[in-house]
Amino acid sequence: MKKKFLAKHTSDSRLTVRPLTLDDIPGIQALQVRCFGGMGAWDVAQITSQMTLFPEGQIGVELDGRLVATSSSLIVAERDVAGWHTFRDISDDGYIRNHDPAGDTLYGIDIAVDPSVRGMKLSRRLYAARKDIVRRRNLRAFMIAGRIPGYHLHAESMTPQEYASAVVAKELRDKVLTTQISNGFAIRSVLRDYLPSDKESVGNAVFMEWLNPQHLPANAVAPVRDVRVAAVQYRMRNIKSFDEFAQQCEFFIDTASDYRVDFLLFPELLTTQLQVLVPAERPGLAARRLHEFTPQYLEFFTKMAMQYNVNIIGGSHLTLENDKLYNIAYLFRRDGSVSKQYKLHITPSEGRWWGVEPGDTVEVFDTDRGKISILICYDVEFPEVVRIAAAKGANFLFVPFNTDIRSGYMRVRSCAAARCIENGLYAILAGPVGNLPFVDGADIHYGQACILTPSDLAFARDGIAEEATPNVEMMVLHELNVETLRKNRRTGAVRPWLDRRTDLYSVNWNEEDGEKKV
């Protein structure tokens, strides 16, 4: 006859599942030493990083005021981890700087249950808590790479795959794998050399997942992978009407459409070509008179974007707003919508010749091919601006520029190349060539359109996807892969975005909803 135990009724719960805090660090480390022995524990910096980057995913179980079980998790994109990987890869060596809030999968990297309370099914409570995160965040799945601590007893007679199959068939029992199967996880594969220091598992892990039955895809649109971009090396020439200007632009738009281009970039100050049509006593007045063409400019490029099914960055155009002159780059989407980015940093010559005023917001635009940023010429020479754009999700940086001599051009290009490396972005640059003898402040031009990438093994040599012949009217185009870019940010030879020392420095900026920091 079994004995019945009656629990005392108290107002406080003896057992609590709760988020971990920094005050738990000593308890976490002591628990991991008890559970993992020679494999050691996370250090203070690693645990602090986990709690800072994804506090919701770090969970503990407390029994009678004592921490007796913990788990650590991060969010990833399933396509990033579908193949072979190691514990060091997925955990970022314990710092989880690869945590991706926009990912679709929760990945459990750690679970520890005090040996003194095993049998109370505390691991089940931790799995349930993490499944709640998956459901709450509408994630696709919950993945783990579980230890197989019983495998070392069978390593001479069985492969790890055979061992895992025997556990699934209940021919063998493994204290970890059996528990995970009972919690609804299905095996995807065996990862060899996942954690070499795990002697009991002989370095192996069983890669498993639990699919969220309540998952509702946010939309039915396939993820964007390849994006085709083009940059126009536009020749400035004397014209006699707006129609001549439009005809020259439409030639490139038509050509880009034939090549199924997603984005077409024109140079900065594209419409200075029209200054010959609005003479004035001094350069500042002539620049302000360019605003007379704003309605035609907007109408023309809006029509072209829809007619030719191309998203067009129409270079930039000097525009009057509240009697202030701004240098504005316009994005003409192929659905007919229009957005704009004001130039943020005004060069001495722009201020001297034309009296241009600066804008004050770094925009990141949603498009049918992902998020993009537009920075006009001089703006790309300020690393903080691109850091903000990257923090807001931009993958593509469009840089319309206008430079007069090679040294000016090289300054813009070199800075754009650095921004690609620093932030894991693609940069597309377009500038004018040719001369406008009767336009003060924009009479000569030096340009070489190019498409730049980060500098790593996954990309073209020298970080140059494509470049034009200098000072010859032409168009360059290239197809850029978003997946390659995103994966390189996390697994490249170096990871400047992930390895930033935000404990030493940061970039702060203001938005309508308050101050932001990256």
Image (tube, rainbow, N blue to C red):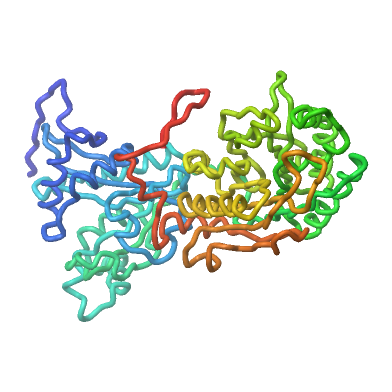
| Place of residue 107 in the rendered image (x, y in percent of width and height, measured from the top left) | 36, 51
Front-most of residues 261 and 249: 249
Front-most of residues 277 and 317: 277
Quadrant location of residue 328? Answer: top right
Image position of 332 with respect to 429: above or below: above
* Quadrant assignment for the N terminus: top left
| Place of residue 155 in the rendered image (x, y in percent of width and height, measured from the top left) | 21, 76
Image position of 193 with respect to 181: above or below: below
| Place of residue 22 in the rendered image (x, y in percent of width and height, measured from the top left) | 21, 35
Give left or right: position of 54 versus 125.
Answer: right
Quadrant location of residue 153? Answer: bottom left
The residue depicted at 61 percent of the width and 46 percent of the height is: 370
| Residue 24 visible in this rendered orientation of the protein | yes
Front-most of residues 86 and 64: 86
Give left or right: position of 224 versus 306.
Answer: left
Tell which residue pokes out farthest to the front in this image: 281
* Quadrant assignment for the C terminus: top left
The residue depicted at 10 percent of the width and 51 percent of the height is: 34
Q: Tag count in the figure?
A: 0
Image position of 241 with respect to 497: above or below: above
The residue depicted at 76 percent of the width and 32 percent of the height is: 283
| Residue 214 visible in this rendered orientation of the protein | no
| Place of residue 40 in the rendered image (x, y in percent of width and height, measured from the top left) | 14, 56
